[in-house]
Amino acid sequence: MTAATTPVPPAQLDADRRRRLSSLFGYAAMVVVIVIIGLPLFWIVVTSFKERGDIYVQPSIWWPSVFRPENYADATSTVPFWTFLKNSLIITSILAVVKFVLGVLSAYGLVFLRFPGKTIVFLVIIAALMVPNQITVISNYALVAQLGWRNTFQGIIVPLAGVAFGTFLMRNHFLSIPQEIIEAARMDAAGPVRLLFRVVLPLSGPTMVAFATITVVNEWNEYLWPFLMSDDSSVAPLPVGLTQLQNNDGVTNWGPVMAGTVLTMIPILIVFLALQRHMIKGLTSGAVKG
């Protein structure tokens, strides 16, 4: 005798069908995103190895007939590439440290300290997030020029040292820390400094990593303000230096330009790949309270 098969309920069939369709749409969306992001990166890397003739040919060549790694040597020798790299490291490092310290301290004050007007201060910070940086370029430029800071590191760094986003991010995380932990620390006579360094910061590692990573990436890629402030290679960062590489000849040789772009991306890409797990965990910290 053969065992009778149990019919699958229609509701379960519909659920399985919806689950398969959801997975299919999910994979399709993931493929589309990979193509949108990966195709330009592939084009940049491939073009960095192309000869000049292969770049301007029609139709476009997706794989060079002859690889030309000399484009990377041209990118570092045609313009003072290493000076631009040094300037980027200086500007990014100082801004990252300043923004990180100010963001953590301001968020800590808004959450754990009592002072009049705290709500107004937070509303001002939120309002600062709504104002595009381009709106303040003219006023900042006039002020920096009056101070005599044009073509200086302080002229580039000081106007970019605002921490509205970092304060907002860290404040939301600090609010997600269980109040029982904070109250227990205060009952143990923990003052503001001890509460910050012994309790709050050890519980905020992933969020601080996310904040630091976002800050480093943003400052490394900053272009408009350094471009307005720098007159020569003495303080210009890499994004500004790449424009000089692009405008070096009458007709742009995109091979060295793309090679310089790849060299500019590599340091920040390494940082992002090394910290991406902590960054995702930090950005989602506090989203679900248990």
Image (tube, grey):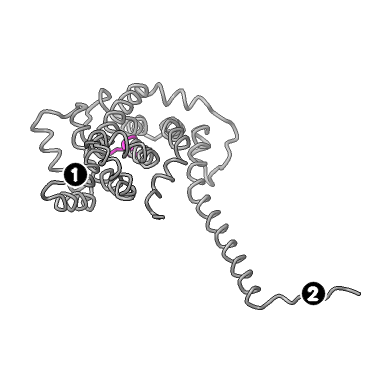
Residue beneath label 2, please? 5
Report the residue at 41% width, 34% height from top. Answer: 268
Q: Give percent across and percent down for residue 229.
A: 20, 33
Which portion, as a residue range, is magenta? 218-223
Q: In terms of depth relative to the viewer, which is nearer, 131 or 188? A: 188
- Is residue 254 at least partly visible in the picture? no
- Upstream in the sequence, badge 1 or badge 2? 2
Q: Is residue 91 above or below residue 272?
A: above
Q: Give percent across and percent down for residue 230.
A: 23, 30
Q: Give percent across and percent down for residue 184.
A: 30, 43
Q: How many marks?
A: 2
- Is residue 125 at least partly visible in the picture? yes
Residue beneath label 1, please? 113
Report the residue at 22% width, 32% height from top. Answer: 157
Q: Give percent across and percent down for residue 136.
A: 17, 45
Report the residue at 53% width, 26% height from top. Answer: 69
